[in-house]
Image (tube, rainbow, N blue to C red):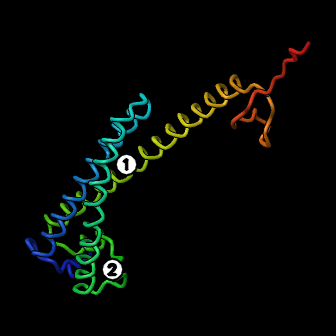
Amino acid sequence: MAADRRVIEAGDPMAEELESFLRELSECYEQLRSLAHLRGEAIRRAEPDRLAACIAQENTLIQRVSEAEKRRLGLVSRFADRLGSPAKGQTAVSWIAERCAEPQRARLEGLASRLREAMTAVMVLNRSSKMAAERVSSHLDGVWRQVSSELSHSKTYGRGGQVATGASQVVSALDVGA
């Protein structure tokens, strides 16, 4: 890269703020990664209390990420204005980092890479948890159908071709007349 593109000097306050922001966001995603592991285990082990605790902690972190995203938009917009980025508020951290002097450039690139890795890991773990939850749900549906089938006195089928599980009434008559 040409030296003339590195217009942000080492120790620049905005670049320091960007570093701090990336560190904070990376920490949030690392915590989300840990919680995603715990959530997956809670689903696999059918531990609803543990699952609820994980979800509550995840919600708190997601709120922090949401607030951080608002700050990111403002910070990136300020950089875009300062550096003349054609992407404006959608300017990538890598584009900003390219314009920073060393060692700040390397730190920003490292933090951005760490953040991308953590975000990707959280997405993969969330997909895995979703599949586990769907399997558990499917299993419970099957158990419910089996129990309903055994308890259905009429053994009649509904529209879906399965034993109807609605309230069934056993009707029987016994003639005890003379």
Q: Residues within 10 Å of mark 2 (few under 14, many from 20)?
A: some
Q: Which residue occupies 30% across, 73% down?
A: 95
Q: CA distance from mark 2 to mark 1?
A: 25 Å
Q: Which residue occupies 15% across, 66% down?
A: 104
Foreground residue, 141 or 170? 170
Say which quarter of the image contains residue 21: bottom left
Foreground residue, 5 or 176? 176
User: Which residue occupies the extreme front position in the image?
Assistant: 178
Three-letter amino acid code at disc 1? Val
Which quadrant would the N terminus be assigned to in this image?
A: bottom left
Residue 114 visible within the image: no
Residue 49 x, y percent position in the rendering: 34, 35
Residue 55 visible within the image: yes
Q: Is residue 33 above or below residue 165?
A: below
Q: Is residue 52 above or below residue 86?
A: above
Residue 89 is marked as 2
Dot 2 falls on a residue whose secondary structure is: helix
List the residue tagged with mark 1. Answer: 122
**Label 2 or label 1, whichever comes before in sequence order:** 2
Q: Residues within 10 Å of mark 1 (few under 14, many from 20)?
A: many
Q: Is residue 100 above or below residue 158?
A: below
Q: Which residue occupies 23% across, 82% down?
A: 78
Dot 1 falls on a residue whose secondary structure is: helix
